Amino acid sequence: MTTTNTPPKTLWLGRWGFVLAATGSAVGLGNIWKFPYITGEFGGGAFVLVYLACILAVGVPIMMAEISFGRRGRGSPIDAIRRVVHESGHGSFWSIFGWMAMLCGFMILSFYVVVAGWSFSYLWKMLSGGLAGNSVDDMAAIFAANNANPFTLGAWSTLVTVLTMFIVGKGVQAGIEKSVSWMMPGMVIMLGVLIGYGAFSGGFADAWSFLFSFNTEGLTSEGLLAALGHAFFTLSLASGAILTYGSYLPEGHSIARTTFSVAIADTVVALMAGLAIFPIIFANGMNPGEGPGLIFMSLPLAFQAMPFGTLFGILFFLMLSMAALTSSISMIEATVAWLTGSKGMTRKQASWGVGIVLWLVSTLAMLSFNIGADWSLAGRNFFGWLDYLTSRWMMPLGGLGMALMAGFLLRNEIFREELGLTRTQHTLWLFMVRYVSPLGIVLIFIDALGLATL
Ligand code: PFF
Ligand code: NA
C-alpha cells in the first residue's frame, strides 16, 4: 500500500526552478486585476487587512502542506493525496480533495482566459496606436466596445487558450524559468513607474488611506469571505497548481523558504498594484467599486497622460499578459498530470483534449460580457458563477480539507520529513494547520451562511 516516492518523471531544471514557477503561478491577474477591483468593491482598508491576515494565517501554512503533499505523493493532486493518505493507513476517500482541486483549477482557467484575453487585446490596442480617449467615460466606452462583439472577444480568449495548451503540451518547465525571471522584475518596475506617476497625480493620499486605513464599517460577511477566497486564489492554492508543481520539487529544497518567498512576492505585487491603480481612480473621480473593468478603465488614462505613455502601456500589458500565462499554465497542469500519470495519455493528447473542453466552457464565460450577460441565475451570470463558486467556496473548502488532513489525519513524520523544520517551527506550523487556519475558514463560512453574526 505504501507506494510513495515513486521516482518523479520531471524535476525543475535549476536551483530556482520551482520558486520561479510557483511565483509565476501565484503572481498574475489575481494581483493586478482582481485584488484592486475587489478591494474597491469591499471598501478598502478593512478588506485589505483581513486579506493580509488570511495570507499569513491560512495561506502560508496551507501552502506548506500542499507542497509537502505534492513532493511526498509525486503525482497529480488525486494520485498524490491518495498515496500520502495510504502511507498513513487511510482510505482513498480523501483523494476527493484532489478531485475538487483539479476541477477548481479547470473552472478558474475557464474564466481566467477571458480576463487574460482582455490583457492581450489591450496590448494590441497599445501597439496599434494607443487608445483614442482621455476621460473616464471614453475608457469605459472602449472597454464596453471591446466586450460587445463575441467574435473578437472570443478570438482573444481563444488565443489565450491555445497559447496555454501549447505551453502545457510542451511541458511547463521549458521556458518558464526564463520568462518568469525577467517578467517579475519587469512587472515590479512597471508598477513602480505607475506608483511614481500616481504620487504626482493628486490622488495618492486618498489611495493610501483607502487601502491602509482600517475601517470596520466596510467589513461585511461577504467581504470576509471574499478576502479569504482571494487569499487562496492569489496564492494558487487548492486548485491543484501548487501541489502539482510541488510534485516536481527535488528533495532537499526548503518548502518553508520557498513558501515565504512566493507569498511575499505575491503580496508585494498586489499591494503595489493597489498603490498604482487607486491614485488614478481617485484623481479622476472614478468609482472604486467599478467592478472587473476597473484596471482597464483606469490604467490607460495614466498611459495617455504620462510621458512615453504608449511605450509604458505596451510594456505593462505585455507583462500582464505574460503574468497571466505563467498562471494559466499552472491551473491546468494538475489535470494534464493526472491524464498522463494515471490515464496513460501523452502530454500532447492530454493538453489538446483538455483544451477543447476548456475552450467550450470559456466561450460560455466570454459570452457573459455580451450576448449572455443576462443569462443569469440568482443574479450571477456564468462568468460570475465560475468566479464565485471557486473563490468563495471550493478553494476555502479544499484548503480546509488539506489543513485537517495535514493536521490530524496523517502521520506527522511525513510533514516532519518534508518540511524539515526545527522543533519549534514545526510545532508552530502544526498549531496553524490544526487550529488557526481551519478555525479561520470555519468561522468565516459560518458567518457567510448567516448562522452567526461576528
Ligand atoms: N494565483 C493566480 C493569480 O493570482 O492570478 C491565479 C491562480 C493560479 C489561481 C493558479 C489558481 C491556480 F491554480
Ligand atoms: Na496572485
Image (cartoon, helix red, strand yellow):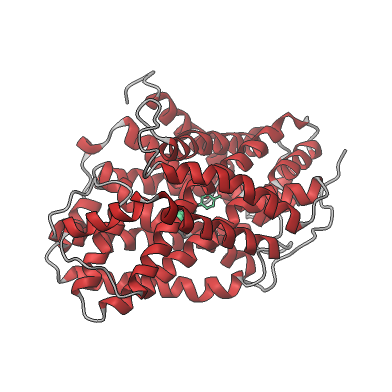
Quarter holding the N terminus? top right
* Residue at (34, 32) in percent of width and height: 222
Tell which of 243 and 299 is nearer to you: 299
Q: Is residue 209 left or right of residue 357?
A: left
Q: Quadrant of residue 271?
A: bottom left
Q: Is 171 positioned to the left or the right of 426 in the image? A: right
Image quarter of residue 9? bottom right
Where 217 sits versus 139, above or below? above
> Residue at horizontal 20%, vertical 51%?
210
Measuring from the top left, give residue 309's x and y in whole percent.
Answer: 26, 76
The location of residue 444, given as percent across then percent down, is: 41, 31
Along the line of sight, which residue is nearer the eye, 116 or 266? 116
Residue 80 visible at all? yes
Q: Residue furthest bottom?
A: 308
Please name the residue shown 37% across and 25% down the image: 378
- Answer left or right for 63 relative to 299: right
